[in-house]
Image (cartoon, rainbow, N blue to C red):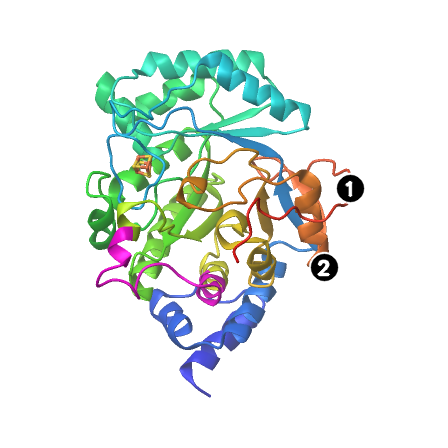
């Protein structure tokens, strides 16, 4: 029996041993994809028993596209002074959240760029007012780099910034901006974003303040499989610390491929890196399966339908994912990079799940199950334009 098969066998048992980075690399490099997905599915059922797959009714709000960080893979941001910059008002944001309330949503994901002029008070006033206008909606807002940006402007440590936001009513800090927590890769594509350590530090602080957090991972920068596992290892170690303190830590792990349209990283693709940037479906499924097996301390693995398409997202449910993501209603970051289908109705998500053979279960941001009304199902709407 090969080393790869021995590792797969040991990971198929009840209470499997923790997968080391070295063994994970063997699986990543050598395992048959169908066997890997099979083992990931076994682990999914051990960690999340039952046949349900969760989804959330939420919406995105991108309150500003002004950003000073200039990540090469970002098609969304505009530098300060650019003619296409915007900053939404409180009423505009509140109106969007009202639309979410009207469809029975439970959380808003509000993120933007690193705006060079908005002080802490602008953010705390916004959160405080949204909290009072929309008490039933969880406000999951910003990302570590935005928190660092606010910290620079107001001169307070990041933990104090987080505490002020939490006290104003912020519910969670989503895990955006992790991308690849390996500086060799990270600083190549986002030199101004700061080290992996910064992201981990702000997330640790958020978890210490009992904010709801998630972990993300963008792949396809031309990094090696080892880099991907080093990213996962850093997330797993931070999660160990949270669990040791009886905290939930990261609720979930979600990965997706880097988008290459309308950004300077994509233009690089036309040169020497043509064959190394981006990933295909089987590589994505391999990554999802490895993440399920690797994370023995993170309960939920999410599939990404906006970036991989609905069919691949369904396949990810057989590679260890137990959650299909959310309705989003509005999406401006991935869609800036050419992806056409970036919002879904609740019934569409239910159909996606049930057509894959699972039972849809509505959840909130903390993965608490909510009452699920199965809506009369409609065909998943195709994107507005289909490729020829
Ligand atoms: S990914 Fe975020 S931090 Fe980077 S340029 Fe875009 S908005 Fe700014």
Q: Would residue 303 appear left or right of 7 to someone viewing this image?
A: right
Q: Residue furthest right?
A: 376
Residue 76 image position (x, y, % from top left): 36, 36
Residue 363, image x, y percentages: 64, 38
Q: Is residue 274 left or right of residue 245?
A: left
Q: Residue furthest bottom?
A: 1
In this figure, which residue is indicated by the disc labeled 2?
357
* Residue 329: image location, x then y, percent: 57, 34
The boundaries of the magenta stretch are: 267-287
**Which quadrant does ligand 1 occupy?**
top left
**Image position, residue 367 (x, y; %):** 59, 40
Q: Which residue is mark 1?
A: 374
Towards the viewer: 305 or 120: 305
The residue sitting at 68% across, 45% down in the picture is: 348
Between 129 and 278, which is closer to the camera in this rendering? Answer: 278
Residue 368 lies, with reference to residue 127, above or below; the image says below
- Identify the residue at image location x=44%, y=52%: 256
Which label is found at residue 214?
A: none
Q: Residue at x 35, y 28 (%)?
A: 65
The reply to whether callout 1 and callout 2 are in contact (CB within 8 Å) is no
Vertical order, 228 against 37 (above or below): above
* Viewer-closest of 197 and 256: 256
Q: Residues within 10 Å of mark 2 (few under 14, many from 20)?
A: some
């Amino acid at each position: 029996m090969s080393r790869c098969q021995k590792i797969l066998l040991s990971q198929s048992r009840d209470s499997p041993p923790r997968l080391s980075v070295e063994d994970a690399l063997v699986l990543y490099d050598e395992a048959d994809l169908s066997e890997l997905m099979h083992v990931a599915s076994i682990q999914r059922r051990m960690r999340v028993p039952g046949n349900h797959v969760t989804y959330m009714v939420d919406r995105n709000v991108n309150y500003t596209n002004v950003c000073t960080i200039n990540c090469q893979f970002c098609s969304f941001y505009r530098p300060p002074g650019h003619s296409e910059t915007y900053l939404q008002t409180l009423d505009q944001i509140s109106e969007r959240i009202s639309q979410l309330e009207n469809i029975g949503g439970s959380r808003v994901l509000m993120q933007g760029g690193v705006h060079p002029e908005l002080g802490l008070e602008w953010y705390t006033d916004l959160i405080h007012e949204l909290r009072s206008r929309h008490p039933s909606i969880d406000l999951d807002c910003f990302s570590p780099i935005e928190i660092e940006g606010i910290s620079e402007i107001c001169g307070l440590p990041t933990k104090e910034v987080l505490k002020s936001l939490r006290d104003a009513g912020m519910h969670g800090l989503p895990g955006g901006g992790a991308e690849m927590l390996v500086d060799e890769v990270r600083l190549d594509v986002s030199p101004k974003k700061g080290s992996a350590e910064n992201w981990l530090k702000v997330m640790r602080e958020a978890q210490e303040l009992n904010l709801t957090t998630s972990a993300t991972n963008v792949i396809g920068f031309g990094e090696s499989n080892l880099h991907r596992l080093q990213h996962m290892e850093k997330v797993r170690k931070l999660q160990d610390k949270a669990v040791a303190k009886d905290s939930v830590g990261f609720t979930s792990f979600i990965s997706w491929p880097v988008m290459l349209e309308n950004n300077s990283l994509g233009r690089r693709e036309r040169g020497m890196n043509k064959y190394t940037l981006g990933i295909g479906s089987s590589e994505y499924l391999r990554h999802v399966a490895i993440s399920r097996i690797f994370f023995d301390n993170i309960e939920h693995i999410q599939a990404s339908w906006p970036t991989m398409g609905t069919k691949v997202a369904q396949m990810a449910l057989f590679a260890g994912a137990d959650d299909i993501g959310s309705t989003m209603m509005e999406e401006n970051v991935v869609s800036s990079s050419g992806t056409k289908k970036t919002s879904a109705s609740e019934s569409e998500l239910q159909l996606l799940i049930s057509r894959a053979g699972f039972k849809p279960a509505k959840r909130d941001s903390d993965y608490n199950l909510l009452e699920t009304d199965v809506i009369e199902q409609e065909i998943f709407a195709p994107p507005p334009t289909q490729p020829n």
